[in-house]
Amino acid sequence: MGISEDEMLTAKKNHNIDDCMLSCVFQKMGVLKDGKMDLDGTYALAEKFFSPDTDKEDIRKVSVDCNKVSDEKIENDEKGCKRARLVFNCLKDNMKDM
């Protein structure tokens, strides 16, 4: 699965990322691995995006809480697109106050 630069720019401009595009990006960034959330990869990535003042335990807690979506049963999700959306929504909802 590949994403063109035009597709990325359009998604960014419209603030609308397709679930499968999100899955691809998460896999490249280490958030998803083998169709499941990779806790260590997510934690490492999150640390890069937050200031050094951010409580590392808060980042770890959100990562652990959102990792639970890896256990949710999802129908017709061979490519991991729906799971990527669940992970994204969980991270977005839980990290907005950090």
Image (tube, rainbow, N blue to C red):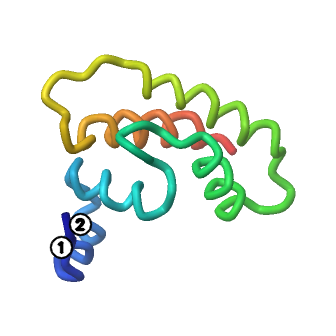
**Residue 46, how many percent across, how many down?**
64, 54
Considering only vertical position in the picture, is 80 above or below 5? above
Number of numbered discs? 2
Q: Nearer the viewer, mark 1 or mark 2?
A: 1
| 82 horizontally vs 52: left or right | left
Residue drawn at (51%, 23%) of the image: 68
**Residue 6, how many percent across, how many down?**
18, 81
Quarter of image, res 69: top left
> What is the spatial separation of the Cα atoms under label 1 and label 2, in whole angstroms?
6 Å
* Helix, strand or loop at mark 1: helix
**Residue 50, how many percent across, how many down?**
71, 59
Q: Is residue 16 visible?
A: no
* Helix, strand or loop at mark 2: helix
Q: Nearer the viewer, residue 97 or 45?
A: 45
Q: Nearer the viewer, residue 49 or 73?
A: 73
Residue drawn at (81%, 45%) of the image: 56
Residue type (three-letter) at the residue carrying disc 1: Glu
**Residue 93, how many percent across, how many down?**
50, 35
Q: According to the image, label 2 marks what residue?
A: 11
Q: According to the image, label 1 marks what residue?
A: 7
Residue drawn at (65%, 46%) of the image: 40
